[in-house]
Image: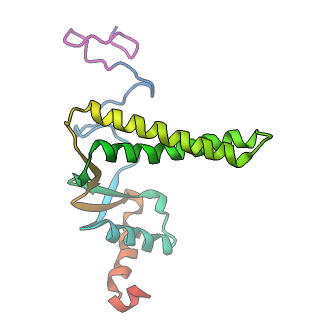
Amino acid sequence: MNGPTSAWRPGLPGGDTIPSGPAGQPSPPSGDGTGPGVGPPTVTIGSYPDYRSAQRVVDHLADNRFPVEHTAIVGTNLTLVETVLGRLTTGRAALLGAGTGAWFGLFIGLLFGIFTAGNWFAVVLAGLVIGAIWGAVFGAVAHAMTGGRRDFTSASSLRAGEYAVIVDQQYAEQARQLLGRLHLQTPQQQRD
């Protein structure tokens, strides 16, 4: 009774069966415990300190008619960087909300403007103004409701410490040969 259709009962005998989700039955971990085995085995053909270098390698492979659909760039040692852009006041939150609301109002105004028989420009302008007003109100109220817990704006990004170029194992030797040609070129040839 411990098959894929049995009920999941954590902590009980036979409770190690994982329930299926929206995407179907999950795959069991691979033999090395790193997760489900996905696709054919791969080989790392190079590691680079920045994305641009890894991209240049894949571009070189593509230029030499290598089947790049069997290639991947994998970032490792990921770091989340949140760059603080500035202080956020209720007035600035209202201004940002007005900008977002104006875009939405413009969109709605254009939709209504298509179907209006009267002054098209007035309908679009009314949508823009009403959207900006409501956006400002919602922006100010949303900021006020935070109670000062987040009085700054920021932008988040993920950065990798290293980028590895991997290829399917059956294409590894061909990729290494093509990369040998890339590294034999002088810096002048690489710029051309």
Q: Nearer the viewer, residue 153 or 55?
A: 153
- What residue appears at the point 22 percent right and 37 percent down from the top-left corner? 33
Q: Is residue 80 above or below residue 180?
A: above
Q: Is residue 18 visible?
A: yes
**Residue 48: percent from the left, percent from the top?**
26, 68
Q: Is residue 188 above or below residue 27?
A: below
Q: Is residue 16 magenta?
A: yes
**Residue 131: percent from the left, percent from the top?**
52, 40
**Residue 23: percent from the left, percent from the top?**
45, 28
Q: Quadrant of the C terminus?
A: bottom left
- What residue appears at the point 64 percent right and 42 percent down from the top-left corner? 109
Lateral position of residue 132 relative to residue 164, left or right:
right
Q: Which residues are magenta?
A: 2-18
Q: Quadrant of the N terminus?
A: top left
**Residue 146: percent from the left, percent from the top?**
25, 33
- What residue appears at the point 19 percent right and 12 percent down from the top-left corner? 11
Res. 163 image quadrant: bottom left
Q: Nearer the viewer, residue 46 or 134?
A: 134
